[in-house]
Amino acid sequence: MTINHTISVLVSNEVGVLSRIVDLFSGRGYNIESLTVAPALDSVYSRVTIVTPADNDVIEQICKQLNRLIPVIKVANLSIGEAIEYEIGLLKVYVSDENRAEFMNIVAQAEAMIMDVNDKTYTVKIDGDEKKVQTFAELVRPYGIKEFVRSGKVAITKGNQFSNIKTLVKQD
Amino acid sequence: MNKIMYSGAEILLKSLQKEGVEEIFGYPGGVVLPLYDALYLQDDIKHYLVRHEQAAVHAAEGYARVSGKPGVAIVTSGPGACNTITGLANAYYDGTPLILITGQVNSKLIGGDAFQEADIVGITRSCCKHNYLVKDVKDLARVVKEAFYIATTGKRGPVVIDIPVDVFNAKYTFNYPKNIELVGYNPNYKGHPLQIQKALETLFESKRPVIISGGGVVASNASKELKEIATKLHIPVVHTLMGAGTYPDNLETSLGMMGMHGNYCANLTVANADVIFAIGTRFSDRITGCLNKFARDAQVIHVDIDPCSISKNVKASIPIVGDIKNVLTTMLSQLSKSHHKVNLELKDKWFNDILEWKKKVAIPQKMSDKLSAITVLEAIYEYTKKDEPIVSTEVGQHQMWTAQNFKFNQPRKLITSGGLGTMGFGFPAAMGACVASKKGYVLNIAGDGSIQMNIQELMTCVDYKFKVINCIINNGYLGMVRQWQEKIYNKHYSQTKISSPDFVKLAESYGALGIRVEKEEEIIPALKKAIEFNGPVLIDFICENFEMVYPWVLAGQPIDKVLLSRGEC
């Protein structure tokens, strides 16, 4: 069954490492739903979080193939077991005088945050899991979304499990 | 601390020497001038000048396959580097350790579309195991050390080192690193002992077991262990094209090659097995045929150094990731401690079935008065077998006929392009094989199409007196493609009729020996003359145009649906 898997990949922070990962996906016909990259705590490493739709056999191959890349240090499929998944959505929404109160109500209930206002539009930040971001966008869609920007997902395991290698995490 | 300063070019050569490199293949050009100057000023590494960069990489691969050591090639930037792509892809597919050094434009010009600039790290990313762009001479020795380590460990493969001209010229001290720090690269060598135990028990209980021996057995030098396991457990062995020679063909339990053009017996044995012990094979589609129907009822024990090969195409019930030699050695030691005894009676029926299947072979097809390719290859094999020559092939019908008709009793004797199927591979690979083996002659079995893909290397062979005997199975067609057109495309021979030059005159114009053979009685005298000649030879065997390769499993069919002659469909 094809579902979205969230893959957390720890890599050496070196030139071309992202190309290697992206090339692997395109070369082998895998899809990337979202991709985020940022330096790890120790900036010689980077953390790449990839959301990819795949069935069980394919996701096994994707993880193995990622592991085969030399600068890839660790691959963890966070969809196995419990993980906290998080993303941010930024929306620019048309709001007229008539529906302003209603709109503000939705924003408050969804715990979204207004980042910028002008005479025609509100720019709002919503964060949380994918479903929350998506639901909020659907709720405000009738007002007219001018722009919708999503961060892609970051994720971390729950509890006392690591997707890091212990020695790579500088402990204070 | 060593305080003497060396140029990047000198550091590179010193690093290669530290890795035990004695011979390299290459072609000079603008940005590698400093490197060729450093080569000129030393005697430790011998450079072989080829006539095309693709041939340099194929030659390095032939060298690596025969010697087991990584092959090394040097080319210039841009077009030089781009010409190596086929060679790299070929080595990557077949897991051959290779180091390719490409020159690059001055590091300050990179990205500015300089003369002969190509983003070779970008271009080669998907056809090599790893690649480096060295922007600082301080990194050079470390990169070479890492490159050799990566190329020769795990699933072996080619590694590209791209070096800008200013790095060749920059000065630095030379200290070859002793250790390697690659946090993300830790190939698993030892198979899991419990998995191996489980595999052993499964094999003991099996009624219809078979071993598939692949190219990994060659890479791991595990033929001896394979033979011991097969003998002790009483299991018949089939091999893939890449596994030729891993299990001696002269043993009764050797069933020969399986796959699209494999033996009837080998294919039927695999199709009917209850336990398949796959060793160092990646289950390519040329082996499995229709994947859904492959080994449906069999338990698959799969040993490979590359985790990606396991359960990629065929789901393994007992996966074992590790170096084959290590895994088989562990298995043998477990076997010696085991109380199990092989139940021969249990396997009696199985061996009876196999004997029956062995009787079914391809039916010879005599179509005209011209030479039959199979007759030619049988004669070549019979005449040369006492010398046990290294045999390389190009790709096509002649390749399959060679694999079918030559018996290989040791590994590293058949050098052929398995995964990528590269026409033009065999001839330059044979040159590399000559350099590595240093004695005797190398047979390159070629087609009239394939030989024309890297024919320019005749000059290289003449220059260095390489004893490469090219046996051209000349049937006037791109025979394998024609064969498919005959069977599947209503005899529409679209662009497969191919003309050739007068190979005898061509050979002579290069200073090589050319012989034409049109009759059976001319085969042996021609071979005799070729072996006596101190240099490269082209023998042009004028063969029947429409001979087909049988046995044949059509693409997408299950592997036990074996056609043995034209009459079947």
Image (cartoon, grey):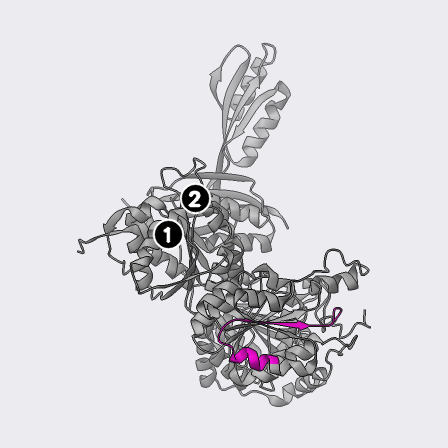
Q: Viewed as shown, does residue A162 lie left or right of B178?
A: right
Q: Nearer the viewer, residue A117 or B344?
A: B344
Q: Is residue B218 left or right of residue A38?
A: right
Residue at (61%, 89%) from the top-left corner?
B344
Pick the front one: B521 or A51: B521
> Counting residues from the N terminus, which is met first, the one under dot 2 or under dot 1?
2
Rounded to the nearest whole Å, what is the CA distance between mark 2 and mark 1? 22 Å
Dot 2 alpha-carbon crowd within 10 angstroms: few under 14, some 14 to 19, many 20 or more: some
Q: Quick check: do tags 2 and 1 share a chain? A: yes
Please state which amino acid type lies under the numbered disc 1: Ile
Residue occupying image coordinates x 57% and y 67%: B507
The image quarter containing residue B333 is: bottom left
Give the residue at mark 2.
A16
Residue B114, image x, y percentages:
43, 38
The x, y position of residue A31, in whole percent, is 58, 44
Read off the magenta span. Answer: B526-547
Which chain letter goes with mark 2? A
Tell me if residue B166 comes above or below residue B314 in the rendering.
above
Can you say whether A94 is above or below B216 in the image?
A: above
Q: Is residue B537 magenta?
A: yes
